[in-house]
Structures are given as C-alpha cells and as structure tokens.
Amino acid sequence: MNKSLIMLGIAALAFTSCKQFKKGEGDMQYIIHEDKDGATIKEGDFIALHAIQKTEEDSTLSNSYDYDRPMFVAEQKSSFKGDIYAALAMLSEGDSATFKINLDSLQAKMNMPKPANTKGKYMVFTFKIDKVIPKGTLTDSLFQGKVDQFLKAEVAKAKSQEAGKISRFIAANDLKPTVTATGLNYIVEKEGNGIKPAIGDTVKLDYTGSFLTGKVFDTSIQAVAKKEPGLFNAMRPYQPMKVPAGVHATIPGFDEGLMLLSKGSKVKFIIPSSLAYGEQGSQIIPPFMPLVFEMEVLEIIKPKPGSPAPVTAPAPVGAQGKK
C-alpha cells in the first residue's frame, strides 16, 4: 500500500476520533485534517489532488492512490450548495479534508450514480491537494502553458521513478524474478508441461492485470473482478482468453512472456512501461506505468493448416497491442 495513503488514513482516523464533522454550506459536512496557509481554490484553477471516495458504510468506490498518480481537475462552478466543487473551494495547496456530500443531490445535479450497496445519505470524499495552479487574471494561453509545464514535469518524474518502484515492489514482495534481455521480469509459480508455443500458436489462458499498488485493472476471472471495486461488468463474458503468440498482437512484454510458457504454467510478469504503454499510456494506463500480470496457461493450440491463429476473446485492457 502506498505510504502516503497509509499516512493520510492514519491522519484522517486520528482527527475523526477527536473531532466531529462540522456543518458546511447546504447539506455538506466536513473535517479539515491539514490546513496550510495559502489562497483557497477558485473557479478555473487547475488542481492536482488525491481523492478517496467511499460510502457511509466505509465501502471504497474509488481511490486515486491505486494508480500511484494524482488526479487532475479544473475547479468549476458549483452545481448545488455543498457539492464537490464547494468542498474543494474550502481548500488550498497542501490541505487535506474529508467531506460528506448529499447522495441524492449528487445523483440529481451531477449525474453521479447512487451505489447499490449503500443505505446512507452521504457520499464520503477525502481529498489531499497536491498542487494548485491559479487561473487568476492569466490569459488562457499563459495559464495552459503553466499547466502543460506541470504535466510535463509529472511525466518526467514518473519516468525517473519507475525503475525504483519496480525494485521496491520486488523487494517488498520477496520476489526473485528472472530478467530477460529486454527487461521483462518473471516469476514461475508453477512449472508447466510440454513444449512452449511456437510463433502463431494460440495460447489459451486466464490472466489478471494490476498495478504495482495491487489495483486490479483487468481480469478474465469473474470471481476476481467481483472482488475489485468498480471493475465487474455484468455484460462481459468472463472466460479464458485466446491469443496468438509471438505475432505482436499484444504489448511487447505480454507477447514476449507468452513464448516462455508451456501448458499448466502459472507465472507472474512484471512488465516495465518500455514493454507496455511507455510514455503515451492509454485510456486507463498512465504514462511510464509498469504492469503486473498473473497468468495460467490452460492450453496451447496449433493452427490449422492455412488458417491464422484466432483471437476468440478480447485482449486484456493492459495487454492490447499499442495504438
């Protein structure tokens, strides 16, 4: 678990145990955990923050710490008294706080679905403000230039920190991976039997993809998906994936890894971003984000003469070929 998240959780628990929620505007309630000097957030400001969203029953719906990166938002005009933007407007750079926001209002005014697993009146948000870039009287071009400069620095920081994060993950989990010439790390948890796939063979496998934080972003296994907040999709058929090996149908690390496995193998791959989505990232994979895949090979299927190896199930989100 991310150290910052642990410290924020401890701080929130300590403050909550000795302080009661205060009444804010509308139906908002709040507790300020850390209050730094500085101007409060104004409409139009750029904000980099961490956010944890929970039900009143303490069920976590989303957690930006799972992605090991802050969220980026623009402060907007409130949709109703005591909404999320009103909460953010109470804070300045470096502040952290927990807010209770009326669920019915969030649903009616901001189109935020009401979780099926709560009977509470409020959604609970804990915010930690990392950076504020004030819009003030800056022209749009000057303001956007400052934002772009900050985002570029964030990407550079992620690049410089990636190798260290992988090393710490390996050490923290007491792993002893084999490292290929390309930098792919893998740990064989169960040896398979038989020959490894040839180029063009179809590999049938179950997989689970996650970040180094442990956040699962994709899986072929329904039971795993149901355990991960917000991941399960009732419309999706959860079943083993079939993918051709060695023909660049997936990201390079996944493609390389398939060629190392025989039927029955269970393996954990730690894939650096250079073998995944690199500096561009994807819709859900941030730039310079290493990925972890746990896989079990169920079958290796030889192609029929004259027929290409089929992909009969969608490639995992984190394993699809680069666009």
Image (cartoon, rainbow, N blue to C red):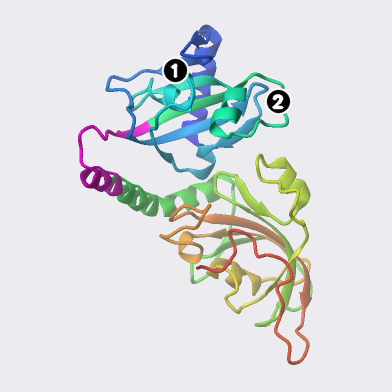
Between 175 and 214, the one lying in front of the other is 214
**Image x and y of residue 168, in percent:** 49, 47
Residue behind mark 2: 118
Is 140 included in the stretch rendered in magenta? Answer: yes
Magenta residue span: 130-149
Q: Which of marks 2 and 1 is nearer the N terminus?
A: 1
Query: Mark 1 belongs to which amino acid?
Result: His
- Residue at 53% across / 48% down in the picture? 169
Q: In this view, does 223 lie above or below 8?
A: below
Tell me the tag on residue 80: none
Residue behind mark 1: 33
Q: Is mark 1 on a helix, strand or loop?
A: strand
Mark 1: few/some/many CA within 10 Å (<14, 14-19, 20+): many
Q: Is residue 234 above or below residue 19?
A: below
Is 199 included in the stretch rendered in magenta? Answer: no
Q: Is residue 50 above or below residue 222?
A: above
| Dot in front, 2 or 1 | 2
**Image x and y of residue 222, in percent:** 77, 50
242 displayed left or right of 269: right
Q: Can residue 189 be seen in this view?
A: no
- Residue 257's quadrant in the figure? bottom right
269 displayed left or right of 75: right
Q: Is mark 2 on a helix, strand or loop?
A: loop
